[in-house]
Image (cartoon, rainbow, N blue to C red):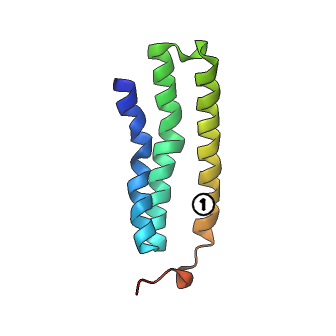
């Protein structure tokens, strides 16, 4: 139960993503990207290491492969997000009528 509640911490960046989707500003995208970096790139390996120490995940090959795939996917998303940030153009943002 504690592992699941700590695991949900990686989803904290979703709040910033949803906020950016409504504003489409470069500053809000930066905030999302920073939160994404700290929650999914920095925290995920720490969480998985603690999970392994407490629950011996290394014996479960599916869990190890899924964790590596999850981290790789997040790393690719972060690289794409960083590229988007450096090429961000606020003049083409969607305007509400």
The residue positioned farthest toward the front in the image shown: 97
User: Callout 1: helix, strand or loop?
Assistant: helix
User: What residue is shown with label 1?
Assistant: 82
Tally of numbered tags:
1
Residue 45 in picture, x, y percent from top left: 53, 32
* Other residues around mark 1 within 10 Å, as few (<14) / some (14–19) / many (≥20): some
Q: Is residue 80 above or below residue 49?
A: below
Determine the image quadrant of residue 11: top left
Q: Nearer the viewer, residue 60 or 45?
A: 60
Residue 70 in picture, x, y percent from top left: 59, 37
Q: Residue 75 vs residue 26: left or right?
A: right
Q: Residue at x 63, y 44 (%)?
A: 73
Quadrant where the C terminus is found in the figure: bottom left
Residue 5 in picture, x, y percent from top left: 35, 32
Q: Is residue 47 above or below residue 92?
A: above
Q: Residue 60 vs residue 26: left or right?
A: right
Q: Is residue 77 above or below residue 71?
A: below
Quadrant where the N terminus is found in the figure: top left
Q: Is residue 34 above or below residue 88?
A: above
Residue 74 in picture, x, y percent from top left: 59, 45
Q: Residue at x 46, y 30 (%)?
A: 47
The residue positioned farthest toward the bottom in the image shown: 97
Q: Residue at x 48, y 64 (%)?
A: 30
Q: Nearer the viewer, residue 81 or 93?
A: 93
């Amino acid at each position: 139960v504690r592992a699941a509640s700590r695991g949900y911490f990686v989803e904290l960046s979703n709040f910033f993503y949803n906020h950016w989707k409504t504003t489409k500003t470069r500053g809000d995208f930066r905030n999302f990207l920073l939160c994404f970096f700290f929650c999914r790139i920095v925290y995920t390996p720490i969480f998985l290491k603690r999970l392994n120490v407490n629950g011996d995940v290394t014996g479960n090959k599916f869990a190890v492969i899924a964790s590596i795939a999850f981290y790789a996917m997040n790393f690719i998303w972060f690289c794409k997000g960083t590229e988007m940030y450096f090429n961000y153009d606020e003049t083409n943002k969607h305007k509400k009528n």
